[in-house]
């Protein structure tokens, strides 16, 4: 904002005559002061404003990648990597709740209520399977996770978005075997 230094300079110049005899000058000073105050208030408000919320569709793309990577890690039997991917997925889910707690897609229900109810049990089952290095339990829990994703899509009138086991890795430059 280039206005501000200019205004301040004018104020200083006008202020130099401590008690302006001319009432018109006094009025001008008062008007400039008011403008500076308004600009400062606007600047403070901008600094305090919250950063823009992440777009839900964008967050879903992130979830899709996490979901696929988790599968590759579990299928490769790399349980440490699977654990990492699951906790990243879990964080991504928490981010969705944090950034879009009242998203229109779930109205009149609150996304902040629906998402944890649908997703957290599936995440817990996966964590258990991974902790036990149990591939069969992993695969079954993974299908449960995918069903939970699709379930929320259905609840949000997006039933055509069906999540399934990936057939090919999204990116294959991350080693998925121990
Ligand atoms: C809280 C409900 C909810 C949950 C849980 C959820 N989604 Fe979504 N998802 C949505 C909604 C709503 C949209 C449509 C977003 C839009 O309109 O941009 C969507 C869109 C998507 C899309 C399409 C994105 C695009 O732009 O092509 C993908 C992929 C996706 N979700 C994957 C997942 C995966 C994977 C999971 C589970 C790990 C999941 N979602 C869990 C509500 C959910």
Image (tube, rainbow, N blue to C red):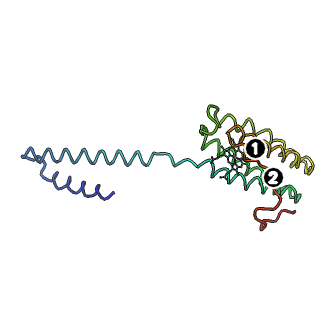
Quarter of the rendering occupied by the C terminus: bottom right
Q: Name the residue under label 2.
A: 83
The residues tagged by marks 1 and 2 sit, at their Cα atoms, a distance apart of: 22 Å
Q: For numbered disc 1, what is the local secondary structure?
A: helix
Instruction: Residue at the far top: name it.
Output: 108
- Percent across and percent down for residue 9 are 22, 57
Where, by quadrant of the figure, is residue 41 drawn?
Answer: top left
* Residue 36 at x, y percent in the picture: 27, 48
* Label 2 secondary element: helix
Q: Name the residue under label 1.
A: 150
| Mark 2 close to ligand 1, CB under 8 Å | no
Residue at position x 65%, y 50% from top?
A: 59
Location of residue 77 by image quarter: bottom right
The residue sitting at 7% across, 46% down in the picture is: 22
In the rendered view, tell whether residue 23 sits above or below residue 58: above
> Against 71, is 109 above or below?
above
Q: Which residue is drawn at 33% across and 47% down?
A: 40
Q: Which mark is residue 115?
A: none
In the rendered structure, the answer to whether residue 7 lies left or right of residue 81 reads: left
- Mark 1 vs ligand 1: CB below 8 Å: yes
Looking at the rendered image, the disc whose residue lies closer to the viewer, 1 or 2, is 1
Q: Is residue 88 left or right of residue 73?
A: left
Q: Residue 49 location in percent, x, y?
A: 46, 45
Which of the two residues, 139 or 22, is positioned nearer the viewer here?
139
Q: In which quarter of the image is the N terminus?
A: bottom left
How packed mark 1 is, by other alpha carbons closer than 10 Å (few <14, some 14-19, many 20 or more), is some
Residue farthest to the front? 160
Near-viewer residue (55 or 9) = 55
């Amino acid at each position: 904002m280039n206005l501000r230094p200019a205004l301040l300079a004018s104020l200083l110049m006008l202020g130099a005559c401590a008690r302006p005899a001319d009432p018109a000058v006094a009025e001008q000073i008062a008007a400039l002061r008011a403008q500076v105050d308004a600009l400062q208030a606007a600047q403070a408000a901008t600094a305090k404003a919250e950063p823009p919320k992440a777009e839900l569709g964008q967050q879903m793309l992130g979830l899709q990648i996490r979901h696929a990577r988790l599968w590759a890690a579990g299928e490769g039997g790399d349980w440490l990597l699977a654990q990492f991917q699951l906790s990243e997925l879990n964080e991504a889910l928490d981010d969705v709740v944090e950034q879009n707690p009242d998203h229109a897609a779930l109205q009149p229900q609150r996304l902040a209520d629906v998402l944890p109810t649908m997703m957290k049990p599936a995440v817990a089952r996966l964590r258990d399977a991974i902790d036990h290095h149990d591939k069969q339990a992993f695969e079954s829990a993974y299908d449960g996770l995918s069903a939970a994703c699709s379930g929320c899509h259905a609840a949000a009138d997006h039933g055509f978005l069906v999540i399934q086991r990936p057939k090919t890795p999204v990116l294959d430059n991350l080693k998925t075997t121990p």
